[in-house]
């Protein structure tokens, strides 16, 4: 019975992990691709870690896997936010029109070292 | 009590985390106690204006709601990603914030990001408006109303701010 | 049945890692590569978790925790560098 539950969780996780990575390749612009990883983190890795917890119930219950899941759930929005900032500040191509009137975005960051201001970043 | 352990909730969480990681041997119990007393004091400057939790019940309900929404939204987004891309209508949406406390804003932005389909991307310098990127949005105003009612309202009820 | 599910999971993770590598190599913007790297380390955590289930051991857990910690710090600092030109203020 437990094995059955673990198997189901593994299959669900597999599906969403593949969908997340597939979205990363398939979606046309950076901001849309940003949605891929949060997806595979939440339900994909989440159900894998839940499967590990269920699997470990036999030999002593541990919460260790849930700690990783909690950590990923806290950090995923932060890295998505920081990557989104890169997209906005470096004017990455976007299918959705960038908000022109949003304050604090339409200027280069003032503390950018001159070395970087002169040479464009690789791939820019 | 207050000077020895200024943030009881944080101390308890730290101790439980350490014990979950390392096991229940006597040495670990001592170490967990030491960590639970020292770490809150070290990071106290960051925590000074931590809002209190008004209702544990409402907080638990919000956690369950978010967990449920993650499952539902994941299925929706999976269908969007696998379906025809040309039909997607991505957009930037500006959400006027009613919450003012920094921790509450961070929590709201994180919840919006962790639920698939929308990612919070920027905050105005005056912390009044949050910018989201939404994978597929048909009616901006309706979407803003929905997430404000769904996540922001319970947050304001839970946190004292 | 569990063994079959584990093999399917390992296959899916391999596929996901390959897709991340495609994005990592194709770019086009550095931000895309950082995003691919972010997904790559999350998938590695998934891989270690599944291997831990398969071999019924908790040893992989330590590695998964370390990857989670370092992966986040790496993504955050790379993103900050790309956005601002420096990591620390």
Image (cartoon, coloured by chain):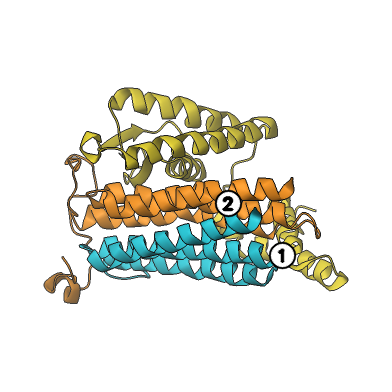
Badge 2: how crowded within 10 Å, few (<14), some, or many (20+)? many
Residue A77 visible here: no
Q: Are marks 1 and 2 in contact (CB under 8 Å)?
A: no
What residue is shown at x 76% (from left), y 52% (from top)?
B2
Q: Position of residue A110 (x, y in %)?
A: 22, 62
Rendered orange, the chain in question is A
* Colour in which chain C is drawn: cyan
Residue corresponding to mark 1:
B21
Image vertical order of residue C2 relative to residue C69, above or below = above
Q: Position of residue B100 (x, y in %)?
A: 45, 37
- Asked if badge 1 and badge 2 are on a common chain, one would say no
**Distance from label 1 to label 2 (Cα)?**
23 Å
Residue B45 visible here: yes
Image vertical order of residue A94 relative to residue B95, above or below = below
- Residue A124: image quadrant is bottom left
Q: Position of residue A79 (x, y in %)?
A: 41, 57
Rendered yellow, the chain in question is B
Instruction: Identify the element where label 1 is drawn.
Output: helix
Residue corresponding to mark 2:
A10
Image vertical order of residue A43 relative to residue B39, above or below = above
Seen as rendered, the residue at the extreme left is: A118
């Amino acid at each position: 019975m437990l094995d059955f539950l673990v198997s189901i969780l593994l299959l669900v996780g597999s599906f969403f992990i593949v969908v997340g990575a597939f979205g990363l390749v398939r979606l046309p612009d950076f901001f849309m691709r940003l949605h891929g990883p949060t997806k595979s983190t939440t339900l994909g890795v989440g159900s894998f870690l839940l499967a590990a917890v269920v699997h470990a119930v036999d030999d002593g219950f541990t919460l260790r896997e849930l700690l990783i899941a909690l950590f990923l759930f806290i950090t995923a929005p932060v890295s998505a936010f920081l990557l989104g900032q890169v997209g906005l500040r470096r004017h990455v191509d976007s299918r959705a029109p960038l908000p022109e009137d949003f304050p604090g975005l339409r200027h280069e960051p003032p503390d950018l070292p001159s070395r970087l201001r002169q040479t464009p970043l690789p791939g820019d | 009590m207050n000077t020895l352990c200024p943030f009881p909730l944080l101390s308890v969480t730290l101790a439980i985390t350490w014990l979950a990681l390392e096991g229940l041997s006597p040495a670990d119990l001592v170490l967990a106690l030491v960590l639970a007393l020292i770490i809150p004091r070290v990071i106290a400057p960051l925590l000074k204006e931590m809002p209190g939790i008004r209702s544990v019940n409402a907080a638990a309900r919000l956690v369950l709601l978010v967990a449920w929404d993650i499952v539902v939204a994941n299925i929706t987004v999976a269908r969007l990603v696998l379906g025809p891309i040309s039909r997607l209508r991505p957009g930037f949406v500006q959400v006027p914030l009613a919450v003012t406390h920094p921790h509450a804003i961070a929590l709201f932005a994180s919840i919006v990001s962790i639920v698939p389909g929308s990612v919070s991307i920027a905050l105005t310098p005056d912390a009044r408006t949050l910018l989201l990127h939404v994978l597929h949005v048909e009616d901006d105003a309706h979407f803003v109303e929905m997430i404000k009612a769904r996540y922001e309202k319970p947050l304001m009820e839970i946190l004292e701010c | 049945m569990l063994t079959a599910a584990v093999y399917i999971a390992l296959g899916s993770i391999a596929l996901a890692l390959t897709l991340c590598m495609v994005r990592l190599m194709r770019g086009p913007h550095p931000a895309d590569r950082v995003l691919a790297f972010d997904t790559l380390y999350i998938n590695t955590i998934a891989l270690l978790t599944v291997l831990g289930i398969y071999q019924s051991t908790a040893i992989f857990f330590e590695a998964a925790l370390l990857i989670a910690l370092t992966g986040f710090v790496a993504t955050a600092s790379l993103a900050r560098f790309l956005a601002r030109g420096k990591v620390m203020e």
